[in-house]
Image (cartoon, helix red, strand yellow):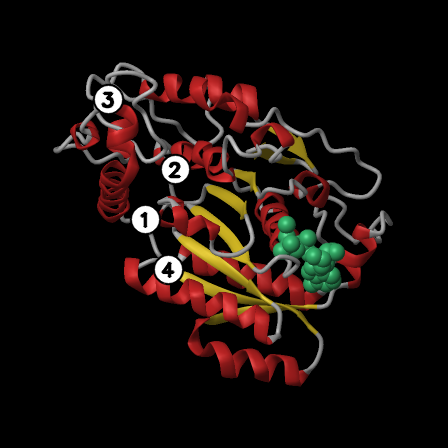
Amino acid sequence: MRIAFVGKGGSGKTTMSALFSRHLAAAGAPVLAIDGDINQHLAEALAPAGDTPVAPPPLGPRLHDIKAYLRGTNPRITSTESMIKTTPPGRGSRLLSLLGDDELHTRHVSRAGGVPLMATGEFDDNDLGVACYHSKLGAVELYLGHLIDGPGEYAVVDMTAGADAFASGLFTRFDLTFLVAEPTRKGVSVYRQYRDHAREFGIRIAVVGNKVTCEEDLLFLKEQVGDDLLTHLVHSDWVRAAEQGRAAPAGPNTSDPLGTLEPHNRHALTVMREAVDAHPRDWDRLHRHAVEFHLRNARSWADARTGEDLAAQVDPEYVPGPATLLL
Ligand SMILES: Nc1ncnc2c1ncn2[C@@H]1O[C@H](COP(=O)(O)OP(=O)(O)O)[C@@H](O)[C@H]1O
Ligand SMILES: [Mg+2]
């Protein structure tokens, strides 16, 4: 299952991506956290106080090699250069299983706070004027496009703030998108933007309130968001302590790193996992969206850029899924 965290800057996307990933990992589930934000802070958020996280070698600068790898022997993709972020897999493409024993995972996954982590990489000065952050996110889009993940396995992506993700097909690659919203007018305005896009494309979103401090906060969210409000986290001293580099107090069960997180916030994480698990993957729909966005990109810029008709990259009878992994 793939889960995205989106929302306004500062709303708590990185904090929640980290908490949710650690929550899943503590329950023994296979989980890969992916930092897809321009400002890369997920490694720090995952690592408990006193731990120096190791940033993984970023995906962004190796986009070309990643394309070459995923392209495999797919005859419909005439060259690595003609492979774009939306190019869907077809016969001959290399498919990935979550945290599989392949070149991509071996090179790009490190661990932070016991959670496997991948990252797009910072947007640096060299990128100014020549590339946009979308090209780095393209690596995540291609990764998810070639990932055959099963139920009970999780890829958790901490996304850029705002509606950037809509510039590509990335936002259609998820089973559930959590919109993190503080109980403020700005917080819910980002929600409205997402809701409208999500409706248009049949994407599942759920709002998770954050930094809720009182009954009025909760009422405000309920009023503004209605049934899309799944659950909420309250202001957390545990999170604040971690942010200040103080170790969280040890709980009775030392094998559970979130053992001393506030019970309300622990419960919210459980509700979030249940919401993810409640809707099994529909591979046909996922692939249909992938093809749709690929054709849009082809028409709007990529055919002209590559000098090819990229619609020809679509393998008509092919739908990736658990069965194709075995071919
Ligand atoms: N529930 C919470 N309780 C206390 N502090 C929080 C909570 N959620 C987020 N924060 C703090 O708010 C700030 C912004 O959170 P962050 O996750 O970095 O936001 P984003 O990734 O959306 O920009 C951080 O200092 C973080 O520690
Ligand atoms: Mg962040």
Q: What amino acid does circle 1 point to? A: Arg
User: In front: 29, or 7?
Assistant: 7
Q: Is residue 8 above or below residue 77?
A: below
According to the picture, the residue beneath numbered tag 3 turns out to be 327
- Taking the image in four quarters, ligand 1 sits in the one at bottom right
Q: Where is mark 4, residue-wise?
A: 204
N-terminal label among 3 and 1: 1
Give the Cα separation between the discs numbered 3 and 4: 30 Å
The quadrant in which the C terminus is found is top left
Look at label 4 and name its amino acid: Arg
Mark closest to the chain's N terminus, 2 or 1: 2
For label 1, the crowd category at 10 Å Cα-Cα, with few meaning under 14, some 14 to 19 and many 20 or more, is some
Tag 2–tag 4 contact (CB < 8 Å): no
Q: Position of residue 230 (x, y in %)?
A: 49, 69
Whether residue 260 is visible to the viewer of this picture, yes or no, is: no
Q: CB atoms at circles 3 and 4 under 8 Å apart?
A: no
Toward the front, the furthest residue is 129
Query: From mark 3 to mark 1, how far is it between C-alphas?
Result: 20 Å
Say whether residue 319 is left or right of residue 180. left
Between the C-alphas of marks 4 and 1, the distance is 12 Å
**Amino acid carrying mark 2 in the image:** Asp
Quickly name the residue at label 1. Answer: 281
- Is label 2 in contact with label 1 (beta carbons under 8 Å)? yes
Badge nearest the viewer, 2 or 4: 4
